[in-house]
Image: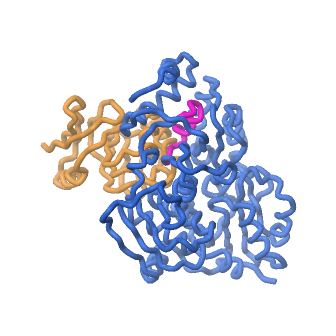
Amino acid sequence: MISLRAKPIIEGECCGELFLVDRKISFYGEVDPVAGEVCGVEGSFKGKVLAIRGIRGSTVSSYIVYSLRKHGVAPNCIVVEDAEPILIVGCIIAEIPLVKVEGFNELVKAFSLGFRRARLISEGGVLILE
Amino acid sequence: MHLTRVEERMLNGEFGEALSVATKILVKVGEALGASKLIEVSHVHISGVSYSNIGEPGLEYLEKLALTKPRFSVYTTVNPSCVDLSLSSRIISLENWEKQAIINGILESMGSRASYTCMPYLLRRPFMFEHLAWGESSAVAMANSFYGALTNREGGPLTIAAAIAGRTYMAGLHLMSERSAKHVVKAPPLNNEAEASLLGLYIGEEYSEITQITGALGWSYSMVKEFLAASAASGSHALVPLDGVTPRGTYAVEEGVERSGIDKRELEYYYDKVSKALELGEETLVYVGCPHLSLSELRQLSTMLDGRRLKRGVHFLVTVPGTYRALGGLDLFLKKAGVEIAVGTCPIVSRITVKPDVVLTNSGKALFYLSKLHKFNVSLASLVDIVKLVSEK
């Protein structure tokens, strides 16, 4: 078990299988809002804990995050290294919990070592990887 | 977060549901980013208005919002939508015309100008140190880096909330402490807007923190515009201070920052990575006007094309602000040469009807999105070189 310091940006339950994309992504252009997939990454993040470095590019991305909810493929929660306003607004209107972690590199390392489940303990401000 | 008495009442719904929801969004985002208070803004620019981009979910969100009958309380402009407002373009698809008309109607009923452009700074020039709440990444980069105004890169729904509340949260680039460069990069001498675009894409990809560029003093307005749009597309740059161009005092350079230079060879190598070589295909689409062309750029283009005709198999698309619906004859030269002018839209936020095997553009931002979203083979070249290649006397 590994624990990382985490700060909930948008409150909510954050628990599930980790879906890691180790870079910044643009939800507009790099995410398929119907399938719930990230360009060039296998599998869907639907119902999982999507961990990304942050977002880049277009300001349309807030609506793309919202449309994930509308299409029923929203992740259970999003974990980021860098919480940016465009993503925060998207998560507010889509009602997706958003968590900022310290030490994203640790998370990446843990993932490669086989820690594939994440669980947020809001009160303690930690994200547990198992 | 500290709220004034009025803001408390806005939040509590004393002035209606719309204002309450809008204030709630601003407060939530502000709190997440450590804002101490809300601040009044003088101009909001709304992004995320194209039906092709935001789709049915976006339309539903706006329709739901419209039920609360919000009114924008400050000067508000909007980004390009997905239809050509002159209804004459054969390249920009009209398939989502009805849905787009609903979106435009909703926004205009709330009080936005029918601007439909990514260049709100042409309609109302920002002042130095003025607080704005703008969406549209290229416009944000211009506001901060060229005009010395203060705005974060806001997402579509937040810009709407800001327009309703007439405020935004005091965090990020609204604070001087957040406007200092962490890197200084010396640009090589650049000849045209395509090279500036290329440098912008490169900076966007290679640097994630605020990066000051030196050597930009002689750049033309078009070069600055293309450079900033590209850096905002490939990275998330909202402020790229240009030494000698960006108003002094609107940013700082941290002491002892890392300084480096980019040489021409590095850029040439990068060009081969991101762009196809400049050549005609069997069906070629030329796209100019990302960001939209200003009147003077449009005049330059019509001079370049005067007396020339497009070669066979070439489509030539130019996009201009929605406020240029009447162009006073400027478009005649271009139309005579076979150029299509689409108003208040662009191929990045719309669907296009042609299936070119090659797209030629002078915009790094267009290259970034057209190759990613529409999966086209895109070549980046200066307008002069493109016009030479695709037209004849």
Q: How many marks?
A: 0
Quadrant including the N terminus of chain B: top left
Q: Is residue B381 above or below residue B225?
A: below
Could you tell me which residue is drawn at 56 percent across and 53 percent down? B143
Residue B227, horizontal then vertical, whole percent: 54, 66
Residue B243, given in percent of the width and then of the height, sits at 48, 67
Task: Point out residue A7 in the picture as x, y percentages from the top left corner.
Answer: 27, 38
Is residue A48 in view? yes
Q: Residue at x 60, y 57 (%)?
A: B348
- Camera-side residue of B46 and B240: B240
**Chain coloured orange: which letter?**
A
Colour of the chain lettered B = blue
Is residue B35 shown above or below B309?
above
Front residue (pair B287, B11): B11
Residue B157 on the magenta span: yes
- Magenta stretch: residue B235 in it? no
Q: Which residues are magenta?
A: B153-167
Magenta span: chief secondary structure = helix
- Which of the pair B93/B221 is nearer the observer? B221
Residue B375 shows up from this direction: no
Horizontal relation, residue B63 to residue B270: left or right: right
